[in-house]
Image (cartoon, rainbow, N blue to C red):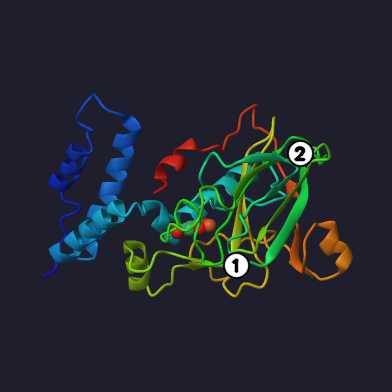
């Protein structure tokens, strides 16, 4: 039996009532958003004949996602984070702002308060025995194209098991392992030593994985390194690089891969480079320059502090 009640006047009146549109108090913006979202969901239930069983399965899943602290994990999986980036790009296009270093999603696993050092940092504590040494470096440029001494490069990535410190289910990693803030030197240069991260996968058996499986999708990301880059008089850049050669670069469940964010990885085996970096053996090297963009009317029109609150 198919019925359609969405367009009935009493249904439309009910939507206005439940969204608070008949009341003078509350937030007009929240009312407008809830009216639109609940209307869209009512219409979905009506048009797709959603059964009570299906509806309550969805409610139980929302409870599971919340209890697991994984709303921020499924968000990129459903493309919201990338869609918001595409909107920021479109806004920049309309303003005539070019982003020589593309933005891409933050992901849910940043932690504030990492140790800070000038010009160089070692990110890993040496305990990940499977790690292949990585040396990454580059120059941070300002909107005038000149190097930006004092720019702050915040960097974080996972270990060879795909686990981030502070979110490691084995509890093995020390706080802030593979997380640092590096202040660019007088030539705008940053450099760090770490290990090449592995790809990441959403927690097995999680409600995030359950929904992706129902969509016939996986929850894997290619190996990647996250960055926040900030400096006076510039907008904060949120981005990531992928590790070249990872088979999932064009099959990222979080849709973060972008052209311009897959720098070459050079395997260095010569003694001069090894000794020049105070290492004992071959290492991977990535050179990656970063370009920041100007403030808009004196402010950063993109900075988003609320993101912090969505972390599990
Ligand atoms: C997720 C994890 C990440 O490390 C990342 O960079 C993006 C998304 C996630 O679990 O959703
Ligand atoms: Fe990540």
Q: Quadrant of the N terminus?
A: bottom left
Compared to residue 101, the image places residue 144 above or below, namely above
Q: Secondary structure at mark 2?
A: loop
Q: Secondary structure at mark 1?
A: loop
User: What residue does disc 2 label?
Assistant: 142
- For image coordinates 27% across by 27% down, the residue present is 26
- Please indicate whether residue 164 sits to the left or right of residue 295 in the image: left
Compared to residue 250, the image places residue 296 above or below, namely above
The quarter of the displayed image where residue 291 is located: top right
The quarter of the displayed image where residue 92 is located: top right
The quarter of the displayed image where residue 287 is located: bottom right
Q: Report crowding for label 1: few under 14, some 14 to 19, many 20 or more residues within 10 A (C-alpha).
A: few
Residue in the foreground of this view, choosing between 86 and 184: 184
- For image coordinates 64% across by 32% down, the residue present is 296
The reply to whether residue 64 is in sight is yes
- Residue 45 drawn at (x, y percent): 21, 59
Tell me which label, 2 or 1, sits earlier in the chain. Answer: 1
Q: Nearer the viewer, mark 2 or mark 1?
A: 1
- Residue 53 drawn at (x, y percent): 15, 65
- Please indicate whether residue 93 sits to the left or right of residue 77 in the image: right
- Please indicate whether residue 39 sits to the left or right of residue 117 in the image: left
Q: Which mark is residue 129?
A: 1
- For image coordinates 19% across by 45% down, the residue present is 12
Mark 2 vs mark 1, CA separation in Å: 38 Å
């Amino acid at each position: 039996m198919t019925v359609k009640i969405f367009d009935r006047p009493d249904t439309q009146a009910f939507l206005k009532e439940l969204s608070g549109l008949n009341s003078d108090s509350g937030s007009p913006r929240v009312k407008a958003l809830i009216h639109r979202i609940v209307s869209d969901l009512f219409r979905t239930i009506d048009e797709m004949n959603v059964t009570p069983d299906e509806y309550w399965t969805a409610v139980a899943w929302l409870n599971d996602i919340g209890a697991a602290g994984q709303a921020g994990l499924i968000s990129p999986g459903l493309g919201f984070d990338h869609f918001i980036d595409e909107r920021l790009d479109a806004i920049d296009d309309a303003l005539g702002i070019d982003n020589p270093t593309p933005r891409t999603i933050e992901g849910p696993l940043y932690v504030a308060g990492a140790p800070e050092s000038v010009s160089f940092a070692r990110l890993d504590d040496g305990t990940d025995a499977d790690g292949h040494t990585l040396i990454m470096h580059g120059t941070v440029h300002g909107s005038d194209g000149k190097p930006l001494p004092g720019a702050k490069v915040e960097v974080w990535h996972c270990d060879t098991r795909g686990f981030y410190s502070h979110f490691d289910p084995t509890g093995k990693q020390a706080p802030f392992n593979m997380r640092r803030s590096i202040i660019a030197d007088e030539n705008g240069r940053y450099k760090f030593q770490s290990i090449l991260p592995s790809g990441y996968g959403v927690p097995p058996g999680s409600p995030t994985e359950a929904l992706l499986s129902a969509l016939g999708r996986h929850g894997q990301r290619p190996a990647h390194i996250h960055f926040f880059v900030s400096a006076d008089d510039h907008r904060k850049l949120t981005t990531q690089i992928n590790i070249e050669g990872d088979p999932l670069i064009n099959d990222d469940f979080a849709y973060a891969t972008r052209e311009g964010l897959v720098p070459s990885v050079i395997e260095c085996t010569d003694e001069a480079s090894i000794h020049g970096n105070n290492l004992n053996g071959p290492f991977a090297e990535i050179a990656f320059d970063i370009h920041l963009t100007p403030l808009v009317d004196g402010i950063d029109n993109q900075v988003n502090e609320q993101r912090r609150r969505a972390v599990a």
